[in-house]
Amino acid sequence: MISGDFNMKKIGILGSTGSIGTQTLDIVRNNEDLKVVALAAGSSVARMESQIREFAPSIAVMWSEEAAKELSARVADTGTRVLCGMEGLLEIAVMEEMEVLVTAIVGMIGIRPTIAAIEAGKTIALANKETLVTAGHIIMPLAAEKKVPILPVDSEHSAIFQSMHGENRERVSKILLTASGGPFRGRKREELTEITVEDALKHPNWSMGRKITVDSSTLVNKGLEVIEAKWLFGVEPDKIQVVVHPQSIIHSMVEYVDGGIMAQLGMPDMKLPIQYALFYPDRRPMEGKRVDFFELGSITFEKPDMDTFRGLQMAYDAIAVGGSMPTVYNAANEKAVALFLDRKIKFLDIYDIIQGAMENHKVIANPSVEEILQAEAATYEYISGRRF
């Protein structure tokens, strides 16, 4: 615990009741110089009420109007102002007193608040994949123009960021993006025909939300990370190599032109990259288990099976086409995973739905935010019109 005289760092969290959001609040509890000034969530009213009473933010936002009304009544005795929808998220994004915006909200609703926050000069701690996957061509040039840092919260992208710290990025020859391989590593296509929702939610190393856990089992999550890495680090996809590393101790690596490789290692714990982003370039003490190399014994590496886990190859295909195609890849997966979690389709149908949506789409070369959202809506409509 840090004590004494200090300047408070004021943060806002979009997606405060989710996995990244709640772990961010754990870090706030352990660092007295962090102050939460804004929180936003989807529909978890009871969780949000609890967070408001503990952290006393100036603003709290619920995505649905109904949830906002219920929350407003519950916290009427506090000084927190309750807002709803996109209007509320945009108000958080430009709050004068906020310095760092943690974007951990799921889905493409994260794009507009991120753009607004960058334009307002806020530091972005980015945990929303969709923002860069679909709008990287808008976000990264804007951040450069406004001189706003985009600090990655994803463990892999944080590892790459840390491995590039102090290095000349023009001397990078390859990014080695590690993957655990998920719960079905080593299985062939025929062994995945009867996979259940419960099977897909048993990740071997990480504790994450339901959608991301399914994405890890299909390797779509790694595909989204490849696209994100292209934009974050300005590296072409053919220089981003996915390496399956089942122990999840090496979080990613960077190879330089002289053959030297820098890697970031640690226990699989999301709090490390979250805290690193919040205090960058400082490192703060953090409780938790440490890597014991004697206990670990060995670390191993494998080539990803892109024929069985087609989601990864589709990501490379989507970014090769570019334009609005990554939006379709992302949106189709989002819809397919929701159908799988609702037990309306089988596990392998996820790949077929993504492929069908990508084949059906007419690409827009340099889409605006409106065109990105239209491409998402058209993809949802296409999938909704299919029979399963």
Image (spheres, helix red, strand yellow):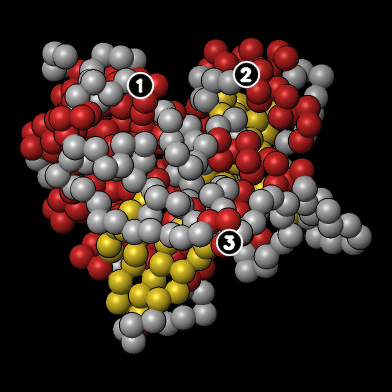
Residue mark closest to the camera, 2 vs 1? 1
Task: Tell me the residue that label 3 is attached to.
Answer: 294
- Kindly identify the residue that appears in the image at 83 percent across and 53 percent down: 1
**Marks 2/1: CA–CA distance:** 26 Å
- Kindly identify the residue that appears in the image at 34 percent across and 64 percent down: 176
Asked if the residue under mark 3 is in contact with the one under mark 1, i.e. CB atoms within 8 Å, the reply is: no
Mark found first going from the N terminus, 1 or 3: 1
**Marks 3/2: CA–CA distance:** 45 Å
**Is residue 119 shown above or below 80?**
below
Label 3 residue SS: helix
- Kindly identify the residue that appears in the image at 46 percent across and 69 percent down: 263
**Marks 1/3: CA–CA distance:** 35 Å
Residue mark closest to the camera, 3 vs 2? 3
**Is residue 377 shown above or below 104?**
above
Q: Is residue 142 visible?
A: no
Q: Is residue 102 visible?
A: yes
- Tell me the crowding category of disc 2: few under 14, some 14 to 19, or many 20 or more residues within 10 angstroms, Cα based: many
Label 1 residue SS: helix
Whether residue 10 sits left or right of residue 266 in the image: it is right
Residue mark closest to the camera, 1 vs 3? 3
Q: Which mark is residue 197?
A: 1
User: Which x, y percent locates residue 62?
Assistant: 57, 25
**Is residue 273 shown above or below 73?**
below
Q: Quadrant of residue 237?
A: bottom left
Mark found first going from the N terminus, 3 or 2: 2
The three-letter amino acid code for the residue at tag 3 is Phe
Label 2 residue SS: helix
Whether residue 194 sits left or right of residue 204 in the image: it is left
